[in-house]
Amino acid sequence: MNINHQTHRKSSLIKKTPQFILLISILLSSTACSSKSLNELQIFEYKEAIRAFQEQQHDTPGVWTCSYIEKSNTESIKDAETLMVEIDEKYIYVKHNNQLTELSLTTRHKENSIYKDKKENLSLQINVIKKSNYSEYRESHDRIAEAELNVSGEKYKLQLLGEACGI
């Protein structure tokens, strides 16, 4: 009886092995797809965006800023790297293909904004979901936002955390 039980366990395991391999394959491919957006955007230092903004000599002062990180990475910008920097709610800087790119505001409706680069290869739609932790005089706050980055027709979705957005 013990030999029969072992034989049954082996045949059961052999029958389940293809299902197990298929499950592992699905999990690995879904992980690869979800990290694809991170391959499109590269981290950079906040100072790089400020420098690039100043070099453009825009007619806005550049005093309102917001540094965004991917929300799933951490709950504090101090511990994470910057994915985007928004300046004066008119420009967003992203690093793509090892180049810092400026996207300019094209449309805003309430908490939903659309930014595009000059060549229109990149566009970003950002929707502020929640604002919190307002400063005493409400000149800055933290925010959670959903973003959709469009790179030459490919779309990538990100959950973002912006900390101390404002003056």
Image: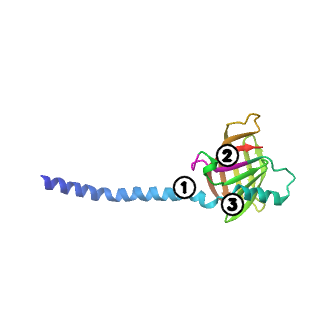
Residue 65, how many percent across, how many down? 75, 48
Most distant residue in the right direction:
59
Gap between marks 1 and 2 measured at Cα: 21 Å
Q: Position of residue 39 (x, y in %)?
A: 60, 61
Give the alpha-carbon distance from disc 3 to disc 1, as whole Å.
19 Å
- For disc 1, the marked residue is 34
Q: Which amino acid type is marked by label 3?
A: Lys
Q: Are the residues at dot 1 and dot 2 in contact (C-beta closer than 8 Å)?
A: no
Q: Quadrant of the C terminus?
A: top right
**Cβ atoms under marks 2 and 3 closer than 8 Å:** no
Which is in the foreground here, disc 3 or disc 1?
A: 3
* Front-lying residue, 153 or 47: 47
Which residue bears the numbered disc 3?
95
Q: Residue 13, located in which quarter of the rendered image? A: bottom left
For residue 154, which quarter of the picture? bottom right
In this view, the residue in front, 123 or 99, is 99
Of mark 2 and mark 3, the one earlier in the sequence is 3
Task: Return the residue nearer the eye: 101 or 164.
Answer: 164
Q: Nearer the viewer, residue 140 or 112?
A: 140
Q: Secondary structure at mark 3?
A: strand
Percent x, y for residue 118? 78, 60
Find the magenta span and give its range.
66-74
User: Looking at this rendering, what residue extends furthest in the top direction?
Assistant: 136
Q: Earlier in the sequence, mark 1 or mark 2?
A: 1
Bin the neighbour count of mark 3 within 10 Å (Cα to Cα): few under 14, some 14-19, many 20 and up.
Answer: many
67 in the magenta segment = yes
Tell me the kind of residue under disc 1: Ser
Residue 129 marker: none
Q: Which residue is mark 2?
A: 162
Q: Amino acid at mark 2?
A: Gly
Q: Residue furthest bottom?
A: 98
